[in-house]
Every structure is written in C-alpha cells, then in structure tokens.
Amino acid sequence: MFCIDNRCTDVYFNLAAEEYLLKRKEEDYFMIWQSEPSVVIGKNQALQMEVDEDFRQMNGIRPARRFSGGGAVYHDLGNVNLTFIETDSRPDFKYYLQRVIDFLDYLGIRADADERMGIYVDNKKVSGSAQCIHKDRVMYHCTLLFSTDLVALNAVLRSRPKGDGRIPGLREARAISSVHSEVVNLSHFVDSTVSLKRFICLLFRYFLAEEESNSIYRFTAEDRHAIEAIRTDKYADEGWIFHRSALKKDLT
C-alpha cells in the first residue's frame, strides 16, 4: 500500500485527488489530508437542505460535494481525513472501519461503531464515513475530529425537521438527509502532550507500519496536473456543488 501525507488544504484538490486515485490508478493507497473550513455534502444531497448558507457565507466556509454518498460533514484544520483506496472485487467496508477503531485503541481510546459506520467515544460521535465502488476499485474515507471548532460545525450543519427529502426548486428529485449526532473532539481523550501535529504523525506512522511492503508516495508533477484538471472541471465547479441532484447523471 502506498501512503500519502497530503499537505494540501484545498478541499477541491483533495476531493479530486481521491477520485484520481480511485479511477485512474491501480495500486492500493492510504491518504491522510486536511482542509480549510468547508462543508462537504454527499453525492446525493442538496446543499440547501444541509447547510445554513448565511452562516457559511459570513464565515468563509467553502461548500463542496464529494464523489461518495453519505451525509454532510464539516472540515477544518482540527479535523483529519483518512482515505483508503484498494482494488477488491468483494469489499468489506467494516474492515476499514475496524482499522480506524484499532488505531484509536492503540492510542488508548475505547471507541464503538454504529450501523451507519460512525465512530463514537462515550456515546458522542468522533468520526463519520462514506464509501463508494468504481468497477473493482473501492474507496472508504472518514473524518476524525481532533480539535475541530464544534461551535462552527453545529452552526453550519443545519438540522432540518423530518420531511420527504424533496429538493427545493426541483419537482421530482429527492435528496438524502443527514442524520445528526452529538459530537466531541478526540483531544479530550488523549494526553495533553498529544498535539494535533503529533496525532497526525502517529496516525500516518501507524498505517505506514501496518505492512512491511507499505511505502510513502508523493504526488508527481503528472499526478498534480491530472488532479488539478479534475478539481477545476468538477469539484470547484458551482454546477457540481450547488445543482447536482440524485437524478442527474455523473458524467465523469
């Protein structure tokens, strides 16, 4: 497995990098990454149903839509994202979930998962995940809240009353609504000497050392050129972010 410590904090580049590794590469990858404040919705969600747009715009929080399904999540530099991409004709996504739980156990944090593959500590959510399959390639990615601004998280992720999931302004399309949970930062459960930087270092080294054959991979100039093209054409495009619905075809 190639392990990538992706230092770019542009959410559109990072989402494009995931799709690039999934669709255009053949090797197995693990990538760790962070993004500047942004709210990332699932492929089949409607931004206006998930996000407080006034708060988002006033606070300079970027909107983004990812390639996988699942619910809306908030990213900032206190949140760490993990991505596993492998070739597997019979994927078991609980396997990837367990690997993350095992890492937390390695740090002395007892964590549990629910049926939606969220990770909880003391009955509060510390991680949300999503998955997707492209041909025989599988992707599992998740968040890990370490020192995220939870006030901003709770403010920008809109809690809506239960309804039929219709997207405002569209007659037929329906959107997948997020399931909201009480959240907490992992920093509350580790020694005070474990900073965010130290946490990221431990996380990367843990998965790098999983197998002797694992090695560090850095994006080449060719990789970056291809990723930037996906970023511009898709993930930073307002048509993808704001107007895509569950009934519109993904042309990429």
Image (spheres, rainbow, N blue to C red):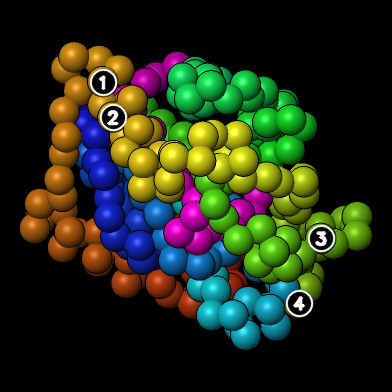
Residue annotated with mark 4:
169
Q: Earlier in the sequence, mark 1 or mark 4?
A: 4
Image height of 170 relative to 148, above or below: below
Q: Which of marks 3 and 1 is nearer the N terminus?
A: 3
Residue annotated with mark 3:
159
Residue annotated with mark 1:
209
Q: Do the residues labelled 2 and 4 touch (CB within 8 Å)?
A: no
Q: Furthest-left residue in view?
A: 221
Specify few, some or many for label 1: CA neighbours under 10 Å numbering under 14, 14-19, or 20 or more. Answer: few
- Residue 63 left/right relative to 181: left
Q: Earlier in the sequence, mark 3 or mark 2?
A: 3
Q: Which of marks 3 and 1 is in front?
A: 1
Q: Which of marks 2 and 4 is nearer the N terminus?
A: 4
- The magenta segment is 68-93
Image height of 193 relative to 73, above or below: above
Image height of 12 relative to 192, above or below: below
| Closest to the observer, 169 or 82 | 82
Q: Name the amino acid type tagged 2.
A: Arg
As measured in the structure, the alpha-carbon distance from the residue carrying label 3 to the one carrying label 4 is: 19 Å
Tell me which residue sits at (50%, 61%) in the image.
76
| Closest to the observer, 101 or 118 | 101
Q: Name the amino acid type tagged 4.
A: Gly
* Label of residue 205 in the image: 2
As measured in the structure, the alpha-carbon distance from the residue carrying label 3 to the one carrying label 1 is: 40 Å
